[in-house]
Amino acid sequence: MFSLPDWAFLPLSAAAIAAMIAGALSFGDSQRRTPEEIFANGLLYEGDRLSEVTTGNGLEAEYLIENGAAFLRIAAIRAPLDGTPSAGAFFALSPSELGALEGHRVRLSFDIRSAPEAGSEGARLSFFVPGIGQNSWQRHNLANTFETIEIEIEPPSCNWDYAYIGLWPDWTANANTIDLSRATLTVLEPLSC
């Protein structure tokens, strides 16, 4: 019977482990885009990608599907500046997205409505990068049907260590919930840095 020599065991084990890791990683994110693609097409959060949302303290988000359409239901239980400040219910940009977009003005578009139950009259929207903080929330009134709200942001800095697309519903006791079906970020002209 053939027996593997002791000196061959370690290299063959390392090769087998590397093959298993490479195989597992090949099933990962196949949607990687180049900085040029990100710059040209911007960012789109809709459908399954809405589940990438993170919620700060004082907010809850639920991923729902209604009549075949996916959306987030976001509820607030406090105001943005009550307690620990956060970017609200937010989408964090990845390092490759930051590298492609920093140093430019941006346009954010939100397809948003007041939720059918406990619907908020309005929502606060913002884009957080270095130099843009909690005082940057822009409040907008909401309808009972999905409508697009756009805001344009001129960041004060050309170097971004982080960037968050944030939302925060109005937070009165019985009217504190919004629905978001789509959020987009479009790159505009470069800043004069």
Image (tube, rainbow, N blue to C red):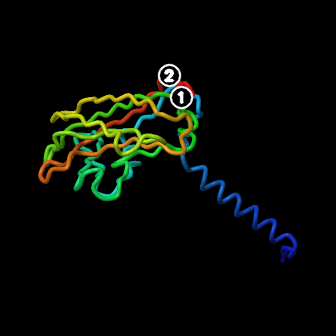
Residue sitting at x 72%, y 63%? 16
Q: Position of residue 181 (x, y in %)?
A: 30, 38
Q: Which numbered disc flags the more N-terminal residue, 1 or 2?
A: 1
Q: Position of residue 44 (x, y in %)?
A: 42, 35
Query: Within 10 angstroms of label 1, few (less than 14), some, or many (20 or more) residues?
Result: many
Query: Of circles 1 and 2, which is in front?
Result: 2
Q: Position of residue 136 (x, y in %)?
A: 35, 39
Residue beneath disc 2: 189
Q: Position of residue 101 (x, y in %)?
A: 53, 33
Q: Nearer the viewer, residue 67 or 156?
A: 156
Name the residue type under label 1. Phe
Name the residue type under label 2. Glu
Give the distance between the C-alpha atoms of the residues marked 1 and 2, in whole angstroms: 11 Å
Q: In which quadrant is the C terminus drawn?
A: top right
Residue sitting at x 87%, y 72%? 7
Q: Is residue 169 left or right of residue 190?
A: left
| Total marks placed | 2
Q: Secondary structure at mark 1?
A: helix
Residue beneath disc 1: 39
